[in-house]
Image (tube, grey):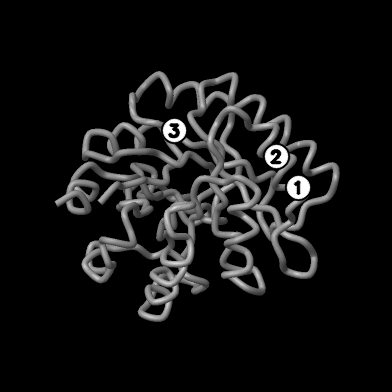
């Protein structure tokens, strides 16, 4: 199973590669479902690892309905990602009525060229996943990151993922993400699902946790570990 690790730090990306990951999705603020990483992070990650790095382009947290000004920001972020060596681009644009924003998607794909583009989990909140699948294929994306329309992957989501893969019929890759664990992997039909996306993270305890002021801010955080990545690659 091809393994993509979503990561937000150089440390996590290095651990992912050491553990056997095949690709990185790089973003910032994983707790908000990810936003665009800084140019410095992209540059440092590309210098530290050799596996492909796909960069998320998301100008803010919240929904995926973007104004003209936000689309322009996304175009500038795509330009920067390309300058600093991104191997692919990840985004998702929706309309106010819950459909794929085809015009914005095509516009950003054009800006991303020649890099491949992935449509992220904005897909999961569209009104009709199977209609959206066809629209995303028509736009020219190479992959969709999806939990099968569920908050986290569950039995219903797995059924939907398999159905989406059947409909896609090789025209685009359906990549499960959102709650993929080592226990979930055996439930996928390997003839339909060939790639998965996960963070493989564990908590890092900050040395400042014992400081008297440690209750003011959350000081611990999550990082990908090579041991967890290895568990997914078994």
Circle 3 packing at 10 Å, graded few (<14), some (14-19), many (20+), is many
CB within 8 Å, label 2 to label 1: yes
Q: Position of residue 199 (x, y in %)?
A: 37, 51
Q: Where is residue 202 in the image (x, y as percent from the top left)?
A: 30, 52
**3D distance between C-alphas at marks 3 and 1:** 23 Å
**3D distance between C-alphas at marks 2 and 1:** 6 Å
Q: Name the residue at the right extreme.
A: 68
Q: Which of marks 3 and 1 is nearer the N terminus?
A: 3
On the image, numbered disc 1 is attached to which residue? 104
Q: Which of 198 and 108 is in front in this view?
A: 108
Circle 2 packing at 10 Å, graded few (<14), some (14-19), many (20+), is many
Q: Position of residue 44 (x, y in %)?
A: 45, 22
Residue 53 is labelled as 3
Q: Nearer the viewer, residue 191 or 187?
A: 191
- Looking at the rendered structure, the secondary structure element under dot 1 is helix
On the image, numbered disc 2 is attached to which residue? 108
Q: Is residue 8 left or right of residue 84?
A: left
169 up-or-down from 36: above or below: below
Q: Nearer the viewer, residue 222 or 120?
A: 120
Q: Is residue 4 left or right of residue 185?
A: right
Residue 111 position by quadrant:
top right
Q: Position of residue 152 (x, y in %)?
A: 44, 70
**3D distance between C-alphas at marks 3 and 2:** 18 Å
Q: State the residue at coordinates (38%, 65%).
A: 179
Q: State the residue at coordinates (40%, 18%).
A: 47
Residue 106 position by quadrant:
top right
- Looking at the rendered structure, the secondary structure element under dot 2 is helix
Q: Is residue 109 left or right of residue 209?
A: right
Q: Earlier in the sequence, mark 3 or mark 2?
A: 3
- Looking at the rendered structure, the secondary structure element under dot 3 is strand
């Amino acid at each position: 199973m091809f393994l993509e690790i979503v990561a937000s730090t150089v440390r996590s990306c290095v651990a992912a590669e050491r553990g056997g990951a095949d690709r990185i999705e790089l973003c910032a603020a994983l707790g908000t479902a990810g936003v665009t990483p800084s140019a410095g992070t992209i540059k440092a990650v590309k210098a530290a690892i050799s596996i492909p790095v796909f960069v998320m382009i998301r100008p803010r947290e919240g929904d995926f309905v973007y104004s003209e000004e936000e689309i322009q920001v996304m175009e500038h972020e795509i330009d920067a990602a390309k300058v600093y060596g991104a191997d692919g681009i990840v985004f998702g644009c929706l309309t106010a009525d819950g459909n794929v924003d085809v015009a914005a998607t095509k516009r950003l794909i054009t800006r991303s060229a020649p890099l491949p583009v992935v449509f992220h989990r904005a897909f999961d909140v569209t009104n009709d996943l199977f209609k959206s699948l066809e629209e995303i294929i028509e736009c020219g994306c190479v992959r969709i990151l999806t939990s099968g329309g569920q908050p986290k992957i569950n039995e219903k989501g797995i059924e939907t993922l398999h159905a989406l893969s059947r409909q896609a019929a090789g025209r685009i890759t359906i990549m499960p993400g959102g709650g993929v664990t080592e226990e979930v992997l055996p439930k996928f039909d390997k003839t339909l699902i060939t790639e998965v996306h996960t963070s493989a993270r564990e908590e890092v305890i900050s040395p400042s946790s014992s400081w008297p002021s440690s209750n003011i801010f959350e000081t611990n955080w999550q990082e990908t570990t090579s041991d967890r990545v290895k568990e997914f690659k078994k």
